[in-house]
Amino acid sequence: MIVHGFVLVAIALGLWMAQGAEAPDAGSTPSGATQVVRPPRFDPPGGVYASNLMVQLDGGGAEVRYTVDGSEPTRSSLLYTNPIPVVRTTRLRARAFTATASSPPVSQTYTLLDPALAGFDSNLPLLVLNTFGAELSAEVKVPVTVRFIKPAPNGRTRLTGAGDFDGLGMIRHRGFSSLRYPKKSFALETKTETGADLKVPILGLPEDADWVLYAPYPDKTLIRDVLAYEMSNAIGRYAPRTRFIELFLNPGADRLCPKHYMGVYVLVEKIKRSPYRVNIAPLRPEHSTEPAITGGYIFKKDHLEKIGIDDAPPLPRSRLAQASVLPSGPGGFPADPAGFDTHKSWPATQLMGFKPQAGRLVATTNGFVSAKGNAFFYVEPKPERITPAQRAWLSNYVNRFEAALYGPNFRDPTNGYAAFIDVDSFIDHHILVEATKNVDGFRFSTFFTKDRGGKLQLGPIWDWNLAFGNCRGKEGYLPAGWYWPQLDDYQYSWFRRLFEDPDFSQRYVDRWAQLRTNQLATEGILRRIDELATWLKEPADRNFKRWPILGEAVVPNYFVGSTYAEEIDWMKKWITTRLAWIDKQFPPVPSAALHTSTNGVTVTLTAPAAKIFYTTDGSDPRAPGGGVSPKAQLYQGPIQVSPGTRLMARLQQDTRWSAPAQLTLPEDARSGSGTR
């Protein structure tokens, strides 16, 4: 059923009023009761039409006044007496009046088609926006009429097809560096007739009033953001849900025509607190003491304002902390040291706790700077709504975390960093950045959340169009090489120190191996790319006719394909090579095989030349801190096992350990391969 920008609810005596609307000009009846006047009804309703219309208004016996310029009808507006001719795109607003009262204003938008679009159809949903002459910018939101059109049962969507949402909104350009491109992204808010936020489900996505219309432009596959968000959700980390659409934007009141076609867009959930998005507790102004003040917060690291602040005092040398370089790689990162580039322009470990340069500071009205010099923006509560007490509490929490992280007992599970952060969320986020080599990762569009009573989490991910090889800078185009060593400690907050904890590092290795056997398996990712590319083949052709950039370099492209298929194929090869390269940076997992004979059941372990340690009770052969567990045995040959044996084995290579191989011996053990 179509959802309109105004919702009608039944009230007494069968009369109607607009839910959520401002109070009408209600008079009093002789009995003293408030008179309620129902809004006019439109016939036909708003929508997209191929020919001119005659629109009838029914005021239920009341006088109807209307406008065709979007202004609110008053008693002096045009009086409805006969059907209204509609010969161009029109927002028709109407209001019913009695002698003493009036209905809330209601409106319908009629978008008329140029004959050249009469036969247009797509396998994607369509979106038609009309701004009626309002100038779009990144600074000011302007009114817009909104119609999402869903596919018919045959899978095709026509402009004159059934609407999924038909109503009103506010819109502006969005983005930072992407504002340079001619194909703009938009922030869209759905609104009621009176301008209040209207939470609605759109194209199967859960209801909300805040949406993003993302415009893939330098990403000529059109799918990098969507693919990354799907990968995040697959590993259990919420990322915004998406829908591919094709967009028409009519800036005036002309008939909708081919020049209004804007190409393939992605409808994206905006990152915000919601039961369906970032599911954290609401934080209200009255929440000023613990436990209520402990959440929920959303804040981010992002492009900073060009102005600085003067209230960040310089820190004494005693509060400076320097990460060490362990043999296993910078900052203890648990990968092959040979996999680290020694390019002289790359930062090594950097001092933390310095007073940042002015260009690296966020205005205190919009965010805060931690004691170690990390600057963050408030997202929720918004800067204008977060209270001084909440600002102070959040800043203090981050400062306490940093003090624990850079303190002498940082590995202590009670008093160290783990008391403040959700460790697994940090590991998963790091894996997503490095697996895709997102060159905006860690430093821009990096969101953090803090629920009431919970720990700090890293995520959700956002803005992944410069991933999967789609950037010449930061060596993003190379499938080999780590991204993070190119960043200083300000850009790469906290991770160098986290990786100095060998147990954090091992947790990272184990998680990578686990994901590579399932959610991040190469075959599954490539299969999903093929599905998305097949789905977009037809719309992509129209998109690149509107924006003829195939075969042309768009900043910051490295690879330039002459066809859509070439762009897809190059990305698939890049991903295949990238994931395989990362696999090789960690010690290989031993393989385990069962063998039966007249002498019983044995297990053999194989791996490249290195020590293998194992246990048979399911415990970890690696001890906390990186040593060998007292229960572990060095593998020297086939292991005699009995039913119910739970074997865990790891390969030890220099100071590093592989992910575990695990095998539980079934009651009827037969020859076969173990799985990790």
Image: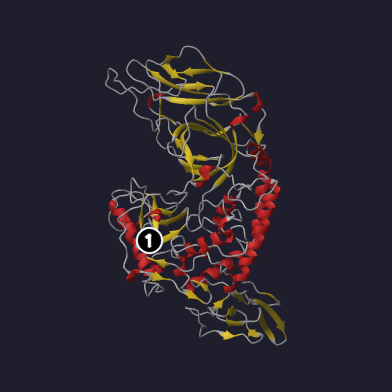
- Reading the image, the residue beneath label 1 is 373
Seen at 49% across and 25% down, the residue is 108
User: How did the renderer colour the structure?
Assistant: secondary structure
Can see residue 268? yes
Q: What amino acid is at disc 1?
A: Gly
Residue 478 vs residue 447, the one in the foreground: 478
Against 103, is 214 above or below? below
Q: Is residue 492 left or right of residue 416?
A: right
Work out which residue is located at the far top of the displayed protein and give it: 81
Against 363, is 33 above or below? above
Q: Quadrant of residue 93?
A: top left
Q: Is residue 312 left or right of residue 597?
A: left
Residue 142 vs residue 73, the one in the foreground: 142
Can see residue 659? no
Residue 153 vs residue 71, the one in the foreground: 71
Query: Where's residue 402, x and y in %?
Result: 37, 66
Query: Where's residue 322, x and y in %?
Result: 41, 71
Work out which residue is located at the far right of the displayed protein and give it: 598
Where's the C terminus, which quadrant? bottom right
Q: Secondary structure at mark 1?
A: loop
Seen at 49% across and 62% down, the residue is 487
Seen at 47% across and 29% down, the residue is 134
Seen at 71% across and 82% down, the residue is 596
Where's the N terminus, which quadrant? top right
Query: Where's residue 302, x and y in %?
Result: 45, 53
Query: Where's residue 510, x and y in %?
Result: 55, 70
Residue 294 vs residue 582, the one in the foreground: 582
Against 27, is 21 above or below? below
